[in-house]
Amino acid sequence: YEAVKELIMRQDRIAVTKCFCAAHQQVRETGCKQPLEVCIMLGFYADYYVDQDMARQITQKEALEILEMSEAAGLVHQFADTEDPGAICNCCPDCCGGLRVLKMLPNPAAYIVSNHFARLDAERCDGCEECVARCPMDAISMTADEIAEINLDRCIGCGLCINTCPPEALMLVSKPEDERQEPPPTNLFMRASKEIEGTLKRDASE
């Protein structure tokens, strides 16, 4: 969550649009009641979506408010695996195509890029089960002693269990250095805004 906020504060062009996955589920009448206008576009992508009447421009303050609202609603922050991502999706675990498929797997943690995982201080856990309900991957269960237990094969490090834990028994922990992954400068799925705009300027000058 802190890293996502830092990303927002580096942006000068931001827009918000409806979540495609949630909108699709609503059309199928299988959607949930989670907030719909939660996908944040950045840089070139913000300009493009606004130009196409698919999004509205917002300020950094509004973007941070959307992040906080999404966090409270139990949505998962996701963005393209690049140093300069063009969008931040705040994904509903019940509607997001990617999260729904991920949840079906026995080991979701092996298929998602995350440098963190959740850790429990068992002595502070009061057995309220709030984290069990919040986890989008069913990574948390209760032991016979009514203490939360985390399955690290399922934990994707999203942090949703952390901020609603009443006794503050949960925390996000960084993975060991040899397991951490740094995002590449760009990727084919969603090229960096600077890269796209540089290409457009070269094409225009030619």
Image (tube, rainbow, N blue to C red):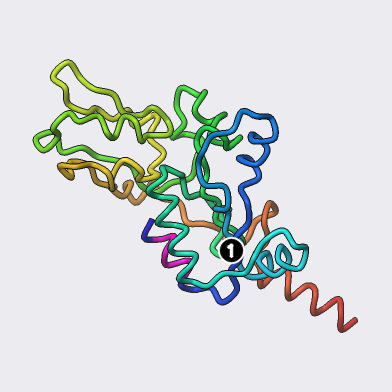
User: What residue is shown with label 1?
Assistant: 185
**Number of callouts:** 1
Q: Which residues are magenta?
A: 3-8
In the picture, measured across the screen, residue 183 lies left or right of residue 29, that is left
Residue drawn at x 48%, y 67% is 62
Quadrant into which the N terminus falls:
bottom left
Q: Is residue 147 above or below residue 186?
A: above
Q: Residue furthest bottom?
A: 205
Q: Give coordinates of residue 63: x percent, y percent.
A: 49, 64
Residue drawn at x 63%, y 40% is 21
Residue 161: name its quadrant.
top left
Q: Give coordinates of residue 66: x percent, y percent.
A: 47, 58
Q: Give coordinates of residue 171: x percent, y percent.
A: 24, 46
Q: Is residue 147 above or below residue 61?
A: above
Q: Give coordinates of residue 176: x percent, y percent.
A: 31, 47
Quadrant into which the C terminus falls:
bottom right
Q: Residue furthest top?
A: 144
Query: Closer to the camera, 81 or 126?
Result: 126
Residue drawn at x 19%, y 42% is 166
Q: Residues within 10 Å of mark 1 (few under 14, many from 20)?
A: few
Give the overall secondary structure of the magenta segment.
Answer: helix
Q: Amino acid at mark 1?
A: Pro
Query: Closer to the camera, 180 or 45?
Result: 45
In the picture, measured across the screen, residue 186 lies left or right of residue 11, that is right
Q: Is residue 12 above or below residue 39?
A: below
Residue drawn at x 40%, y 50% is 71
Badge 1 element: loop
